[in-house]
Amino acid sequence: MTKRMRISDFGPPWRDFIKEVCWHGNISEEGHIGPQHLESGLGQGLRNYFLLMYYKNYGVLLVGVFIILTFLINPSCKSQPENSPPYPATLSVRIMPENPRASGKLSVVTEGVEGENTAFKYCWKRNGQEIFGETVKTLSHFNLSKHDAISVVVTPLQGDAIGRPVESASVVIVNTEPIISSATIQPQPSYTNSQLEVKIKAFDEDDDLIVYSCQWIKNGEEILNETSHVLSSSCFERGDSIQCRIIPSDREVYGRTFEAESIRIANSPPLITSRTRSEIACEGFFMYKIDTNDPDHDILVLSLSSSAPDGMTLDPATGIVEWKIPKGLTGSYPIDIIVSDGYGGRCSQTFNIYTGES
């Protein structure tokens, strides 16, 4: 039990001194003095202690030691941390991800925060300038551009206490490579007389101009010096398998290689290039020369349909149709000429012959 003392227990020389030590109402009305009455601050305690030393009295010296011990033991006398009355502190602030894209979302990560009830105030910056209206933990859907330097200032709050603002290191918006979403070779079907073209759909998050490097491939082998988006018909033949490998670029970085689905060069149908119209046969005779063309240079077979009138002939070697019309024959006769290339390709031409008196 702590011994309670009265001021009257001290002699006159230092009775007034004890009152000096216990100023500001720290002495009870009954004149009792105890540790709870000696809770002066450190500076006040030391001042009073050295004042006691002035009296050079051993008993008074013990009282001074008692005062200092009271200060050291009593928690209310201990000094507060440097940030007191307790202001919240943030030791570090960083932005994630470290290599953000213009279309992505940025978030703040805080570490070393003191106080469970600490809130934060955020201020985002772009290239050193405040982004007005962006005051939350994340930054998204803002008009960022590649190479922008983004930072954030975080101020911790705890009640009415405001901590020291901490600014993160900047992260730089990286350039985003272009991406090809689809590519097709046109036209389809393609023939030996077709000029091929690759149709490309691509996008770039930074809205950069996209350029393409193409490599055409025939039957699994690269076609030398064919790197544009078109391929001449002189580079392939019927039955060849054609592919195109495309690499996009925004002139800073290359995107992923995309391979268009291969196509096979189809057989080209033959063509009848000569033209005729409905003929009126006079003087009992009809003749017509058929001109043809085949892009694959196939040997063509010419024939007449079964509807051809009796006596009409077609010379396959020359392509000449002849008909000696019997006397007295009148009317309209349809003629159907068929040309085939032996690979499934064919074409036809139809016209009418009118016979009768001139």
Image: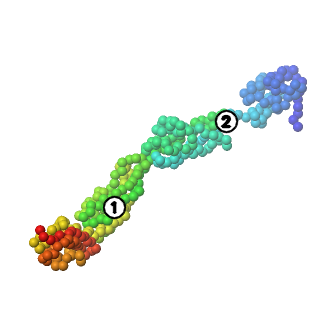
| Residue, disc 1 | 185
Is residue 158 toward the left or the right of residue 346 in the image? right
Q: Is residue 96 left or right of residue 238?
A: right
Question: Are circles 1 and 2 on residues that touch, CB within 8 Å?
Answer: no
Residue 18: image quadrant is top right
Q: Which image quarter is the N terminus in?
A: top right
Decide: few, some or many residues near mark 2? Use Cα within 10 Å; few <14, some 14-19, many ≥20.
Answer: few
* In the rendered image, the vertical position of residue 168 relative to residue 11, given as above or below: below
Marks 1 and 2, how far apart in space?
A: 66 Å
Amino acid carrying mark 1 in the image: Ile
Please state which amino acid type lies under the numbered disc 2: Gly
Circle count? 2
What is the basis of the colouring in this image?
rainbow
Q: Residue at x 15, y 68 (%)?
A: 280
Is disc 2 placed on a helix, strand or loop?
loop
Question: What SS does tag 1 mark?
Answer: strand
Q: Between disc 1 and disc 2, whose residue precedes?
A: 2
Viewer-closest of 159 and 45: 159
Residue 79 position within the rendered picture, expressed as x and y whole percent measured from the top left: 70, 34
Instruction: Specify few, some or many for label 1: CA neighbours under 10 Å numbering under 14, 14-19, or 20 or more.
Output: many
Quadrant hosting residue 38: top right
Residue 351: x %, y % from top left? 21, 68
Percent position of residue 202, x then y: 39, 54
Name the outermost residue toward the bottom.
311
The quarter of the image holding the C terminus is: bottom left
Considering only vertical position in the picture, is 50 above or below 182?
A: above
* Residue shown at 23% from the left, 76% from the top: 307
Answer whether residue 157 is visible to the viewer in this image: yes
Say which of marks 1 and 2 sits in front: 1
| Residue labelled with disc 2 | 159
